Structure formats: C-alpha cells, structure tokens
Image (spheres, rainbow, N blue to C red):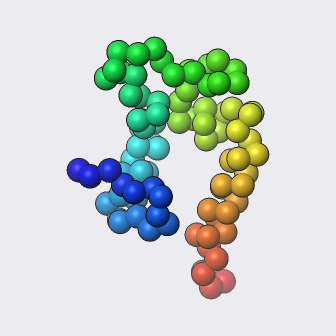
Amino acid sequence: MEKPDLNTNVLSENDQFEVINRLVIGHFRLTHSYLLSNDDVPLCETYRLPLTVKRILVECPSLQDIRKKVIVSSVKELFGNVDN
C-alpha cells in the first residue's frame, strides 16, 4: 500500500481509513520505527517520556497550544459546510 500524501488537504477514502486505524491502534512511523531499526524508544523532547500517539494527541503539556490550533481548525473545517 502506498503511503498517504499528508501534504495535501485531500486524502483518498482508503488513506483516511488508514490514518484513523493507525490512530486507534497507536502505531505511526514516528512512534514505532525504532522497532525495525533497533533504535531506542523515541522520547518526548520536553519530558523525556516515551513518545506515543496518546502522548502527542492528549497528554503532553508542551503540545497543548498546537493541539488547540489543529483540533479547532480541523473541527471547523469538518463542520464548516454542514447545515444546521
């Protein structure tokens, strides 16, 4: 399967499902590539805790401002064209 192009605003339906599935299971290249490369577990740069999808999306206080911007803009984009 070809990697989704996250540099565009449009993902195919299959790519959307892949991203959602990876979020659900918590496996992304950033968080799990160390398993294949025999490297150390990646750590959060600020708190030196294991880097996980949950840490990035929910837990890390140093990413809170970025999360607010991304999540708010994503939700606005998702519902911007929906009629009440």
The residue located at (61%, 32%) in the rendering is 55
Please, which residue is most extreme toward the left here? 1
- Judge from the rendering whether residue 56 lies leftward or rightward of residue 36; answer left or right: right
What is the tally of numbered marks visible in this picture? 0
- Judge from the rendering whether residue 69 lies leftward or rightward of residue 77; answer left or right: right
The answer to which image quadrant residue 27 occupies is top left
Q: Position of residue 72 (x, y in %)?
A: 70, 59
Q: Nearer the viewer, residue 1 or 54?
A: 1
Q: Position of residue 4 (x, y in %)?
A: 36, 55
Whether residue 39 is situated above or below residue 7 in the rendered picture: above
The answer to which image quadrant residue 69 occupies is bottom right
The residue located at (49%, 66%) in the rendering is 9
Q: Position of residue 66 (x, y in %)?
A: 70, 47
- Judge from the rendering whether residue 57 lies leftward or rightward of residue 14; answer left or right: right
Whether residue 75 is situated above or below residue 50 in the rendered picture: below
Q: Is residue 17 visible?
A: no
Q: Is residue 53 visible?
A: yes
The residue located at (69%, 21%) in the rendering is 47
Please, which residue is most extreme toward the front here? 7
Please, which residue is most extreme toward the bottom here? 83
Q: Position of residue 84 (x, y in %)?
A: 66, 83
